[in-house]
Amino acid sequence: MAQLIKKIKGTEDILPRDSYKWQFIEKVLSEEARVFGFKEIRTPVFEQTGLFVRGVGEGTDVVQKEMYTFETKGGESLTLRPEGTAGAARALLEHSLTNDGLPIKANYFTTCYRYEKPQAGRQREFHQFGMEVYGADSPVADAELICAGASIFERLQLQDVRLEINSIGCPACRKEYHKALKEYFASHKETLCGTCNDRLEKNPMRILDCKSPICKEIAKDAPKIIDYLCEDCKDHFEKVKTYLEDAGVKYTVNPTIVRGLDYYTNTVFEFICDGIGAQSTVCGGGRYNGLIEELGGNPLPALGFAIGLERLLMVMDAQGIEIPKPEAPALYIAALGESAEREAFSIVNSLRQSGLEAHFDIVGRGLKAQMKYADKIGAKFTLVLGDNEIETQKAQLKNMQTSEKTDIRLGEHFNSDFFAALIESENAGNLF
């Protein structure tokens, strides 16, 4: 016997018995995106490596440690996308989407790939839902995007979700902040990890995002960016807070939030839900006004967020939030013999054309096994067809919840219209 091939470490299979949960969440997210005026964008799973080096940031952990990069036969360096924003921004530039009018609002469902230690809520292949806005510089755009996130979590009935916000300013005010950080962390150079010592010269803000417990402890007393904001950035942040208050969205200012990617500027935020271990952030985002310019375009303000779907499902499961199961099959036909099988095939096809889910045996089970299977899949009605039913063109439709049986005629009298009428009749009770 050949050796069984198993899934790659850090990946998960979404099985048929669980896929309805993903479909439900995707439906809710799509509906919320539509309400806020977003349209879906789909980008390739791999891009030129330079896109992420320039867009995400050469000094980030994502680029330095976590990307899946490979060389093609033609010698081109490509990378599996580690996040969704850079690809969306590249598509905007390549297809001149700004000609469609501003603002551009795009949402996406995407798989992402990062080489890191698999753990609860963090996989090497993971799924994200994102919302991106291009061409809006007003603080009301920040607040609107945050409101979209809050609306999603309210719609999904998540409990104890808190919003934390911060401003990391613009390049001008960050210049002074970087000086203060370098001076502070230089006195702890002997204690910082090797990676953070490299960051000290290139981008000291990255030290604030280090996962090392020692570096985290040192960073607690580091200068706060909010104390170094220029007047424009300070005014922008104050207006974002005002709009959130007007919308009734509660928040906490957390001056330690910097986000892990270099393209962020000004407003940054996280939706956090405790109770699922260390991976408590279910949504993160902010403004990235310099990204489009970094990728070769003209200056264009931008902002967005991403929700990790695996983590979102973890939260819902931990909180006991029940995801509605799909409708059970309307009918299962237990067919015995070739003539009965042909009749069952005809009936099932007719019902499916009317949008009803119907099944019949296609694996050669006996009657007892077929009825057991009908019960297992939760069929609302069953119909047994054998030689006698085919000869008389009469059969009994059984309501599997009440055990009530209804005499029916086969052939032209038993079609999708008849079955739809039966569903609405008193014989069907409240099953449909």
Image (spheres, rainbow, N blue to C red):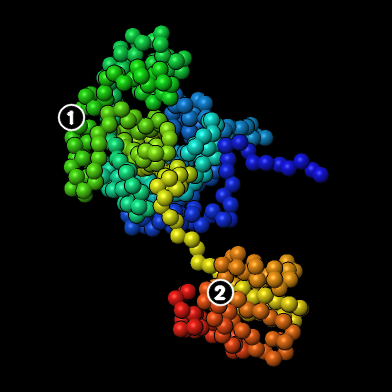
Q: Residue at x 22, y 32 (%)?
A: 233
Mark closer to the chain start, 1 or 2: 1
Indicate the quadrant where residue 430 lies.
bottom left
Q: Position of residue 190 (x, y in %)?
A: 41, 8
In the displayed orientation, state which residue is furthest to the right.
1
Q: Residue at x 49, y 53 (%)?
A: 22
Which residue is identified by label 2?
400
Q: Residue at x 25, y 34 (%)?
A: 253
Local packing at callout 1 (Cα closer than 10 Å; few below 14, some 14-19, many 20+) is few
Asked which secondary structure carries label 1, the reply is helix
Q: Residue at x 33, y 47 (%)?
A: 159
Q: Position of residue 67 (x, y in %)?
A: 53, 31
Q: CA distance from mark 1 to mark 2?
A: 70 Å
Q: Position of residue 422 (x, y in %)?
A: 51, 83
Three-letter residue code for mark 1: Glu
Asked which secondary structure carries label 2, the reply is loop
The mark found on residue 231 in the picture is 1
Q: Quadrant of the N terminus?
A: top right
> Visible in this render: residue 284?
no
Q: Position of residue 302 (x, y in %)?
A: 34, 41
388 or 117: nearer the viewer: 388
Vertical placement of residue 102 versus 116, above or below: below
Three-letter residue code for mark 2: Met
Vertical placement of residue 132 versus 332, above or below: above
Local packing at callout 2 (Cα closer than 10 Å; few below 14, some 14-19, many 20+) is some
> Visible in this render: residue 118?
yes
The mark found on residue 183 in the picture is none
